[in-house]
Image (tube, helix red, strand yellow):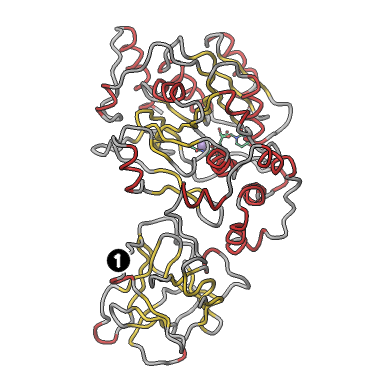
Amino acid sequence: MAVGFMLISIFLIQHSLATVVLNEEIHDPRCKSVEYGPDLPSASIIIIFTNEAWSSLLRTIYSVLNRSPVHLLKEIILVDDFSDKEHLKHKLDYYIRTRLPSKVHLLRLPQRSGLIRARLAGAKMASADVLVFLDSHCEVTEFWLEPLLQRIKESRTSVLMPIIDVISDESMEYMYSKGAKDFFQIGGFTWSGHFTWISIPPEEEARRGSSINPTRSPTMAGGLFAVERNFFWEIGSYDKDMDVWGGENLEMSFRVWMCGGSLEIIPCSRVGHIFRSFHPYTFPGGKDTHGINTVRLVEVWLDEYKRLFYLHRPDLLMVDFGNITERLEFRKKRKCKNFKWYLQNIYPQLFIPDENVQAYGRVRNNHMCLDTLQRHGKDAQYNLGIFSCNEQAVTTQFFSLTAAGELRHEDMCAEVLNYGADNVPMHVVMYQCHGKKGNQFWEILKSGEIVAKYSGLCLDSSDLQPGDDITASVCDGRRSQLWIWDNYIK
Ligand code: UD2
Ligand code: MN
């Protein structure tokens, strides 16, 4: 926490001297030369929370108060989603009344509503031109607000995100990536319905020109964004029947793009966020709200591509997801584009695991299947493994052999590093797909072998137990080298 408050107090001193400078540690130096017009729209900052720690909540509020131009900051709306922690009761009321400016309001929800309905409640109360949503454990940096407001003034149908920096959940330190101030990622998603960070494709780098210009993003992380107030309602606000946490970010992303808006990251605006490895609040009823909320959005927005979601999440096929009539009607009335359009125009890099492929689904040898062993989506590389076959294909066992010959899982492609000197079986490593064949080029033989063409080795399950790394060894047609895919495409 110390660092955060230190930054704030340093800034207070700067303010009193009337010399406003960018934090050189954080911002791209080119952001300095950007000029913001005199009459920017005003902002309502909406901060929702349930059982947030006192220090992180105040860190968020103070950073907004100290680092937003007074005339542009119309109000801060705190929405308490039915917290029961003592410090958030009278102590918070008293603190707001006695220590904070009158533009800080507190709305108490009479029952636990979840983050989606909490944000809706805050948005209804707001009166400024622009809504800016923040999680309750953030620290905004100097000049975070102006670039967002400027862009909305130019383009009222753009929904904007700052670059989200990491605040350590252990030391509470604001971690800025020194030497890489112009590096950031944009949002993607996986077919199992999860948000991911992806690199900016070369076409978008070319389109935006400078790396401090608005950068289009297929999806948003969800917590930190700015949107013109009327446009927020026009574009369908949120699905109010989504509970607690999860999925609303992808729902909003697809909806914004498909219904005539756009999603952009504004690189000169930076906000730190404490990324936590657990939820410090309850999920009433113990429901998988992320799963159920995702089914709601899949049923409304994904059209025929929902097949791919259910192929990865067969466990959600039968789940009760409630009524979605209102959302479907919104889509129809607003004449939103279809999901195919979104994929082709907004996220053409996304791998579609059953299109342009030779085979897909589980890859079985006897009772064992290729499996990521939950290692996917974490590191830049991982060893491919093997596990007892699941009854249906699930994310960890869903692979494709692409038309181009990649043995692929999401954006990762299998490689065998060496030639396996002395007949030692080799591990198979999943790396970012490079699309250049070479060491990522595989072939399925009619007899069932899966051959790494570069090394000539075959995937082999001999002597392996569920949970082991898969190996590749010299092809000799033995049974442990013969694999059956769920689906073959001519
Ligand atoms: C990310 C988003 C978060 C939200 C979520 C998907 C960022 C930085 N964060 O997860 O905003 O979009 O993905 O749903 O992009 N809260 C309530 N009521 C609840 C649960 C949560 O008010 O029932 C509040 C919570 O106090 C916090 C905010 O909602 O201020 C987001 O929750 P989180 O911080 O646990 O979500 P996060 O950052 O893991
Ligand atoms: Mn958060």
Whether 245 is drawn above or below 483: the answer is: above
Image coords of residue 262 (percent x, y) = 49, 36
**Disc 1 element:** loop
Relative placement, left or right, of 355 versus 2 is: right
- Seen at 47% across and 74% down, the residue is 358
All told, the count of numbered labels is 1
Q: Nearer the viewer, residue 120 or 169?
A: 120
Q: Kindly identify which residue carries mark 1.
A: 436
The image quadrant that residue 118 belongs to is: top right
Q: Is 475 drawn above or below residue 222 in the view shown? A: below
User: Would you place residue 69 above or below residue 292 in this image?
Assistant: above
Q: Quadrant of the N terminus?
A: top left
Q: What x and y, as percent, mark residue 149?
A: 44, 21
Q: Residue 231: horizontal and vertical position, in percent?
A: 57, 27
**Type of residue at label 1?**
Lys
325 displayed left or right of 14:
right
| Most foreground residue, 258 or 221 | 258
How many residues crowd mark 1 within 10 Å: few (<14), some (14–19), many (20+)? Answer: few
Residue at horizontal 45%, vertical 10%? 70
| Residue that appears at 46% across and 31% down | 160
Task: Describe residue 48's horizontal placement relative to residue 320 as left or right.
Answer: left
